[in-house]
């Protein structure tokens, strides 16, 4: 039988930890936060919203869930530290990292898993947990149930998905293209505009509409492609390349993506 | 003195033409549309919203503005056809193409220019002209005034900008990165998910948040970068590359953008 998670100890104080702590507290769950280094910003946050501790030995030994929200590289180490605390056998230990296998936690406890909010988290910006997908997996069905039930408390049920290790790793790759790489393209366009004294802000509505039209019709994004490469307009492509000549890195991105679009649409 | 544009003849029946025709009619301007090939879809649209003609010789010879909304390659040709119609000397001829110099129209009439709505237009989706930048330029100040005044009628004044030829060409390059290339990345992520039987829709909120966080803080998009390449997380980069091994094109995009992000953030 799955346990109902009511007491949560969060290890870490990054953007994911903060956002989850606030969301859990809002729905009446008991939250404790462990953070190694106290910063003034952290003290302010912890005083406002969660019971904080500075030594892992002080962690609540009766929590239902120990949620590891640290950098990918630190997960195994935190797991080892938790192992030494002799936590009760029935508790759950989970991490929040999309790109990390849950097997990293397999030697610590029977009930382990992942509680991954598929979103980009930013300093100073609270995430809306109703507007993202929770990807859940765990070492056994009852732990999966417990973590899903927890996600249901802070998000709409249709946003909560059981995703196995292989699928989550692939989603994580796709997320790089959707978020990291598109952000890089937007940043590159901004730097180009700044270097050429053009007002980048004129492009903000275009950026919004690019995504809005996909949301309105997400079945086949290839059909929404527009531009010179789609049309096979080599005159415009040559003009663009000339304007990018001073910036070899950006020209390289222009050339690779243009070549692939031309090939995809057989122009 | 600038003329107040009240009668507009639109040449072309693409997405830009349709959207502008509807917007002009909504504010009470007289619109005539010339289209070479009548499709059933076109007849439906023209009957609903604009007076249409099938022969360029039938075009209203007293229009204040002849607006060329055809493909880039067709602009000069339409210009030549208009030249043979002996239009009144004081009228304006303008095109709507961001990537085309206004000088293409210089031999036809004294008052020529560009009326460029910086946006991506999609079939079956009406554009909100209050949510985009109009880039205006013309052969003389009074024509610039007339075109700006026209844009003010269908958009907020703060969205209307006088942009010279060189600046518009550069904006057009930046727009390729913001729209064409980001759409290609989103399409690529979708195709990868489909090929790997992963539900791409889980990534839609991430796509939205990527753009929302830029709109909330557009000053420096580089600061919003997240992900393995930003962190210099070579273990994750190697894992991602392995998952992309079957797809050489997509791997090439992954490698180039990852290298550039690593270099930019000096990881």
Image (cartoon, coloured by chain):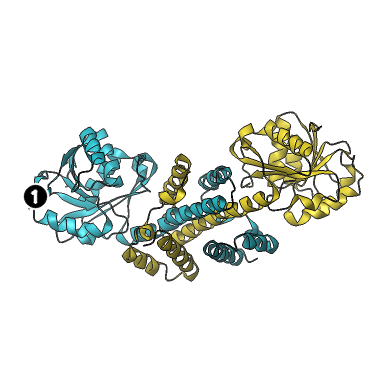
Chain colours: A cyan, B yellow
Q: Nearer the viewer, residue B71 or A106?
A: B71
Q: Residue A209: percent from the left, percent from the top?
A: 55, 44
For residue B258, above or below residue B133: below
Q: Secondary structure at mark 1?
A: loop
Say if residue A196 shows up in the picture: yes
Q: Is residue B51 above or below residue B206?
A: above
**Residue occupying the far top of the picture:** B28
Q: With respect to residue B148, does A159 lie above or below?
A: below
Residue B135 location (% of width, % of height):
67, 43
* A72 sits to left or right of A173: left
Q: Where residue A156 sits: x, y (%)?
A: 35, 39
State the image quarter where residue B44 is shown.
top right
Closer-to-camera residue (A38/B15): A38
Residue positioned 65% across, 49% down in the render: B167
Q: How many marks?
A: 1
Viewer-side residue, A93 vs B131: B131
Residue A221 seen in the current view:
no
Choose top left, top right, bottom left or bottom right for residue B124.
top right
Find residue B246 and report its image quarter: bottom left
Q: Residue at x 72, y 46 (%)?
A: B96
Q: Residue at x 70, y 62 (%)?
A: A235
Instruction: Quickly name the residue at label 1.
Output: A88
Q: Is disc 1 surrounded by few (<14), some (14 to 19) or many (20+) residues within 10 Å? A: few
Toward the viewer: B131 or B89? B89
Quadrant of the rendering where the C terminus of chain B is positioned: bottom left
């Amino acid at each position: 039988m799955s346990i109902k998670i009511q007491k949560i100890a969060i290890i870490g104080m990054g953007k994911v930890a903060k956002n989850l702590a606030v969301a859990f507290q809002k729905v009446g769950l008991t939250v404790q936060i462990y953070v190694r280094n106290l910063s003034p910003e952290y003290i302010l946050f912890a005083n406002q919203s969660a019971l904080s501790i500075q030594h892992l030995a002080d962690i609540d030994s009766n929590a239902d869930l120990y949620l590891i929200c640290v950098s990918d590289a630190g997960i195994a180490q935190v797991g080892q530290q938790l192992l030494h605390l002799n936590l009760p056998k029935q508790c759950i230990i989970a991490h929040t990292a999309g790109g990390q296998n849950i097997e990293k936690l397999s030697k610590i406890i029977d009930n382990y898993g992942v509680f991954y909010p598929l979103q980009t988290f930013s300093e100073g910006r609270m995430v809306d947990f109703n507007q993202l997908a929770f990807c859940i997996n765990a070492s056994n069905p009852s732990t999966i149930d417990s973590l899903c039930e927890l996600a249901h408390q802070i998000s709409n049920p249709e946003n909560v998905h059981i995703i196995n290790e292989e699928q989550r790793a692939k989603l994580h790759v796709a997320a790089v293209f959707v978020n990291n790489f598109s952000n890089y393209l937007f940043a590159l366009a901004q730097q180009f505009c700044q270097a050429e004294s053009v007002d980048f802000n004129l492009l903000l509505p275009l950026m919004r509409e690019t995504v809005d039209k996909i949301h309105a019709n997400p079945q086949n994004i290839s059909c929404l492609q527009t531009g010179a490469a789609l049309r096979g307009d080599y005159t415009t492509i040559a003009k663009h390349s000339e304007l990018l000549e001073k910036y070899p890195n950006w020209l390289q991105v222009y050339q690779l993506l243009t070549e692939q679009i031309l090939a995809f649409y057989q122009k």
